[in-house]
Image (cartoon, rainbow, N blue to C red):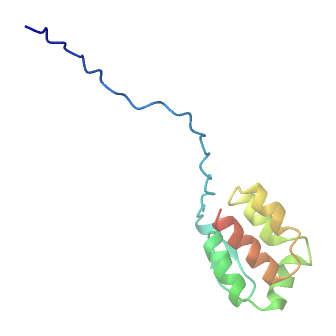
């Protein structure tokens, strides 16, 4: 009588493949301040975060923008740095010389 040969079934495990870890993009938090820390736009709204500033830039006049950027430095940049604690955004806003560029810069930081 022929002998039965038993073949042991090995558990097949999937091969481990080294994968690249893709760092997640760290989203810049949108800090919101209240009260005296809010920014009071000349002849315009009260701004408490970058979303508010983005909306304010859309509707403010060029004269109002110049009022905050020409006379004693850039008020927007100072506020973003001091109240919102966002040094990189403040640095970028400080070199914006018109509303359109400032709006694009704010939009960039909100979408990071």
Position of residue 53 relative to residue 32, above or below, is below
Horizontal and vertical percent position of residue 29: 60, 58
Q: Which residue is drawn at 80% across and 64% down?
A: 78
Left or right of 62, for residue 53: left
Horizontal and vertical percent position of residue 24: 59, 49
Q: Quadrant of residue 1?
A: top left
Query: Which of the image's four quarters has the C terminus?
Result: bottom right
Left or right of 43, for residue 16: left
Q: Residue at x 61, y 56 (%)?
A: 27
> In this view of the protein, which residue sits in the foreground, 51 or 42?
51
Position of residue 35 relative to residue 21, above or below, is below
Position of residue 10 relative to residue 32, above or below, is above
Q: Residue at x 69, y 90 (%)?
A: 59
Horizontal and vertical percent position of residue 98: 85, 82
Q: Quadrant of residue 9?
A: top left
Residue extending furthest front?
1
Q: Residue at x 71, y 69 (%)?
A: 108
> In this view of the protein, which residue sits in the foreground, 26 or 10?
10
> In this view of the protein, which residue sits in the foreground, 22 or 63?
22
Q: Quadrant of residue 33?
A: bottom right
Residue extending furthest left?
1
Position of residue 25 relative to residue 71, above or below, is above
Left or right of 2, for residue 60: right
Horizontal and vertical percent position of residue 51: 61, 73
Left or right of 12, for residue 83: right
């Amino acid at each position: 009588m022929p002998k039965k040969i038993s073949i042991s079934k090995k558990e097949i495990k999937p091969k481990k493949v080294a994968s690249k870890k893709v760092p997640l993009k760290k989203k810049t938090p949108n800090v919101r301040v209240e009260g005296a820390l809010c920014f009071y736009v000349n002849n315009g709204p009260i701004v408490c975060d970058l979303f508010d500033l983005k909306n304010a830039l859309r509707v403010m006049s060029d004269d109002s923008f110049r009022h905050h950027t020409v006379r004693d430095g850039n008020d927007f940049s100072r506020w973003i740095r001091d109240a919102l604690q966002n040094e990189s955004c403040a640095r970028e806003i400080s070199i914006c010389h018109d509303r359109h560029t400032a709006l694009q810069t704010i939009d960039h930081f909100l979408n990071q």
